[in-house]
Image (cartoon, rainbow, N blue to C red):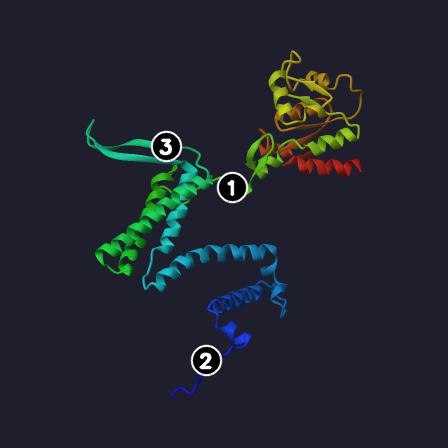
């Protein structure tokens, strides 16, 4: 017999009791416990601390990596949780993740097409196809939306089969699991088939690194590494401020070379020019160099270039040669008597700041 009165049932409980009864407290506590364990395991070997924040698990990079995984699994867990609450199963979730990633990678790498296959009897029996739609260079958002349509359609189809046939969701999604696994590997090997491989590869390479793509004014979107290799206005401003003259020696004709310099907004920093049509000879003839420095006075020279021809010209006029490794020349040139080699102009700027201070 229950001796609780109506007043007891309706009476207000303490804040702690109310908090513990909340359904979200359990998952939140589990997450905090997990983070604490990760924190302790991230403490460097040989060290000991009762503070879980002493390791690398709770620095900016560790927190970002942890929450990146939590966010991905959390989105999946929401859908899986709703299914479990309704008394159903979906065993194909993991395979769907792999399928979606593969489809998106293939679309980003090779584009998207809608084709209709048919049997042709012209010259024998074989399968041909009619292309209804072809999209090259699909953006990440476009690839995501196309992949989302594929995954939603497959999920709808599984649900339709379960509802119409009355077969257990366990059986249907188990079949979906094996189908998606096979389809993913088949699609990978069909599209990603290098010339030197007969079976194809399940690894899609040469994908653009969209996380490192930035917008550069005057150049559009490009990867950060490529952006760093662009001429650095900071360097040119430093040289001009210190009274160091800068010139251009190029094989390009004046009209096209000027367009490039104006497009890069660096034309105004140079004091002399030697274009491909400025003299009767071309690099590595020293006449090209002396034409660019004509009227600028005597002094010591340093030459920035990215080809073997630039190196020959620099040595012919007795100039120090600074080799830009992201140009046309092979990397073996670094051992060919080069005074300085650099990957991007930021490195060269730092070098001159040290020399001029």
- Residue 249 on image: x %, y %: 67, 21
Res 339 seen here: no
Q: Choose mark 2 or mark 1, whichever is in front.
A: 2
Disc 3 is placed on an element classified as: strand
Which numbered marker is on residue 9? Answer: 2
| Outermost residue, top side | 280
The quadrant in which the C terminus is found is top right
The quadrant in which the N terminus is found is bottom left
User: Quarter-wise, where is residue 126 in the image?
Assistant: top left
Q: Distance between the residues labelled 2 and 3?
A: 67 Å
- Residue 320 on image: x %, y %: 72, 29
Q: Mark 1 points at which residue?
A: 210
Asked if 136 appears above or below 210 in the picture, the reply is above
Q: Nearer the viewer, residue 282 or 144?
A: 144
Which numbered marker is on residue 130? Answer: none
Disc 1 is placed on an element classified as: helix
Q: Distance between the residues labelled 2 and 1?
A: 58 Å
Q: Name the residue under label 3.
A: 134
Dots 3, 1 in contact, CB < 8 A: no
Q: Choose mark 2 or mark 3, whichever is in front.
A: 2
């Amino acid at each position: 017999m229950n001796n609780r009165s109506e007043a007891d049932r309706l009476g207000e409980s303490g804040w702690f009791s109310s908090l513990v009864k909340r359904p979200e407290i359990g998952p939140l506590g589990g997450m905090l416990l997990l983070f604490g364990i990760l924190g302790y395991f991230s403490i460097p070997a040989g060290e000991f601390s009762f503070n879980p924040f002493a390791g690398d698990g709770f620095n900016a990079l560790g927190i970002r990596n942890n929450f990146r995984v939590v966010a991905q699994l959390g989105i999946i867990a929401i859908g899986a949780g709703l299914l479990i609450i309704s008394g159903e199963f979906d065993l194909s979730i993991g395979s769907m993740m792999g399928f979606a990633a593969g489809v998106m990678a293939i679309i980003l790498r090779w584009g998207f097409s809608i084709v209709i296959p048919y049997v042709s009897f012209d010259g024998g029996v074989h399968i041909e196809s009619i292309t209804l739609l072809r999209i090259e260079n699909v953006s990440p958002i476009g690839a995501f939306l196309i992949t989302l349509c594929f995954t939603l359609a497959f999920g709808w189809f599984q649900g339709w089969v379960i509802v119409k046939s009355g077969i257990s969701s366990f059986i249907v999604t188990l079949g979906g699991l094996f189908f998606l696994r096979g389809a993913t590997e088949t699609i990978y090997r069909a599209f990603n088939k290098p010339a030197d491989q007969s079976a194809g590869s399940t690894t899609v390479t040469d994908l653009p690194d969209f996380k490192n793509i930035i917008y550069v004014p005057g150049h559009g979107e490009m990867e950060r590494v490529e952006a760093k290799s662009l001429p650095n206005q900071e360097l040119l401003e430093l040289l001009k401020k210190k009274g160091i003259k800068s010139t251009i020696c190029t094989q390009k004709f004046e009209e096209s070379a000027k367009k490039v310099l104006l497009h890069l907004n660096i034309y105004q920093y140079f004091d002399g020019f030697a274009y491909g049509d400025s003299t009767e000879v071309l690099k590595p003839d020293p006449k090209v160099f002396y034409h660019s420095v004509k009227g600028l006075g005597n002094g010591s020279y340093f030459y920035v270039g990215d080809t073997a021809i630039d190196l020959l010209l620099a040595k012919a006029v007795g100039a120090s040669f600074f080799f830009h490794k992201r140009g046309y020349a092979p990397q073996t040139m670094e051992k060919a008597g080069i005074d300085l080699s650099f990957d991007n102009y930021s490195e060269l700027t730092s070098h001159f700041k040290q020399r001029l201070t």
